[in-house]
Amino acid sequence: MRGITAKIYNPNKNAFNEIIGYGAENNTVMDRLCAFFIALSPILQHYKGFYRNAGFSVLIIISPVLVLRLLSNLAKGKYDTKCLKAIVPLLLFQVYKIFDHTPNISKTLYGIFMIIVLTAIALGCVNVRYFVRYASVISVLAGAFLVVQYCCYYILGFHLQLVPTSLLLSDANAWILGVRTGLYGLNGAKNGFYRPCAFFLEPSHLFLYSFPVLCLLLFSPGMNRHRKQTAFFVALSMILSTSGMGVFIAAGLLVAYYMFYNGHDNIAKLKNIFSGKNIFILAAVLSAMIVAYFSIDVFQLMIKRIFSSVTGNSTAIDGRTRLARSLIQNISDKSFFIGITDNVSDITFNLPGFYATLYKHGIIGIFLSYLFYIPGIFKLKEAGFWTSAVILLISFFTAHTHGTFYLIYFVIVIMNGYHTAEDRKIGKIKSNEITGRGSQCLTARTEQ
């Protein structure tokens, strides 16, 4: 465990150094703290802070550094215009949210703050290399603690609680019982289904945090043995979390890596999908899942939670969208374009990102927000492409794709994708496509 985190953090051994360079010139202690707090903010958003929550509080603390970097980069013209163009729809979305429905001081200040933060990210004011390093370490630690929790529960007979519940905000009360016991059941009943989630509040939060790291590990150029091992560990932690989305995304990304990237100099042709090796891998995975389903109780409960229902009401995946669809169906024609209200405190279930945006900000909000996400499918490659694809998919099942902190997290990863594409275009980065040949294939930078 110590070796994995040390190699991820060590600036001389980190496999991302040559391929993640946006904002790398921001190398002071304060820049490192900025990257660290931004990487930690999706977790801190559920804890008490001096303003709103701890996540927002640390963003306020580091905002002077971001503003100074932003002004400096604008004055010197030190930014990637491709990144700036890509972020414009999201900036317009923030402006639209200020004036949509009833404008007030709080909404205006929040919108201006988000515009500054997102613009700073797009203009290279955040050291993405440090951010990815911290996020990778956090993901690996989460997976390690997850294994420890399973061992404590099934071997030693107790649940290891890692979340300090006394520091949580009042709106996190719905998660406290699960955090303290680790027990969840089908359809939300607390009937003994053990689902630990390390220091996250629930398994889906662990998945949301880890999948961008998994995309970077698997699909960045210059794969080596250590990075592949780390990727498998992060994927395993997503699966062990028993999050339905985590299981399928982790499995899907691993399959995509082996079918399209591993050992190939370019994206595999259609014939490679049906190669003997890929068919064997797929058959082996399916066989292992079938054996696990009939022999491992936890795995069987996890699958049942995703695909079946004890009460007959809904599956875990359908439950995320069924009520949301019913809510959207009642929107009038006029409200369909501008939304109903940005206050959804009266809604007692979690609205997925797509449905929440449609309900609050209408078709205009959907258009502006997805005008940022969708181009990543067509313009980005490797980690940027897969991160964008996963975000688009899960936006129909989870609310966090449009929430403040995961939005900032995802924007940083996607901005790195645009910057990497621009570096490659102008010759700063020369690389083969992802291979499994080890560190010899690590991306090389040419002298400027």
Image (tube, rainbow, N blue to C red):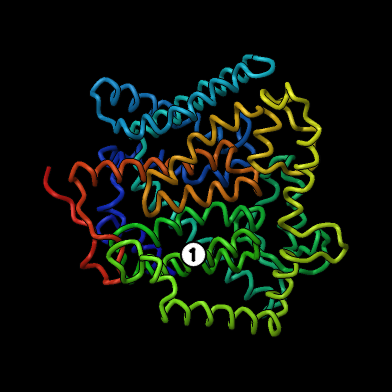
- Image point 62% across, 76% down: which residue? 151
On screen, residue 334 versus residue 98, left or right, reads right
Q: At which x and y percent is residue 163?
A: 64, 54
Q: Tell me: residue 193, above or below residue 448.
A: below
Q: Quadrant of residue 270?
A: bottom left
Q: At which x and y percent is residue 384?
A: 40, 49
On-image quarter of the N terminus: bottom left
- Outermost left residue: 447
- Outermost front residue: 271
Q: Tell me: residue 299, above or below residue 403.
A: below
Q: Tell me: residue 63, above or below residue 41.
A: above
On-image quarter of the C terminus: top left
Q: Is residue 375 visible?
A: yes
- Image point 63% across, 29% down: which residue? 363
Q: Quadrant of residue 106?
A: top right
Please give the residue where the numbered disc 1 appears in the rendered image.
Answer: 234
Q: Nearer the viewer, residue 42 or 124?
A: 124
On screen, residue 69 versus residue 110, left or right, reads left
- Dot 1 falls on a residue whose secondary structure is helix
Q: Nearer the viewer, residue 387 or 109?
A: 387
Q: At which x and y percent is residue 156?
A: 68, 78
Q: Quadrant of residue 6?
A: bottom left
Q: Residues within 10 Å of mark 1 (few under 14, many from 20)?
A: many
Q: At which x and y percent is residue 440?
A: 20, 68
Q: Tell me: residue 433, above or below residue 295.
A: above
Task: Say which amino acid is labelled 1.
Answer: Val
- Image point 57% across, 50% down: which residue? 393
On screen, residue 354 versus residue 194, left or right, reads left
- Image point 47% across, 51% down: which residue? 387
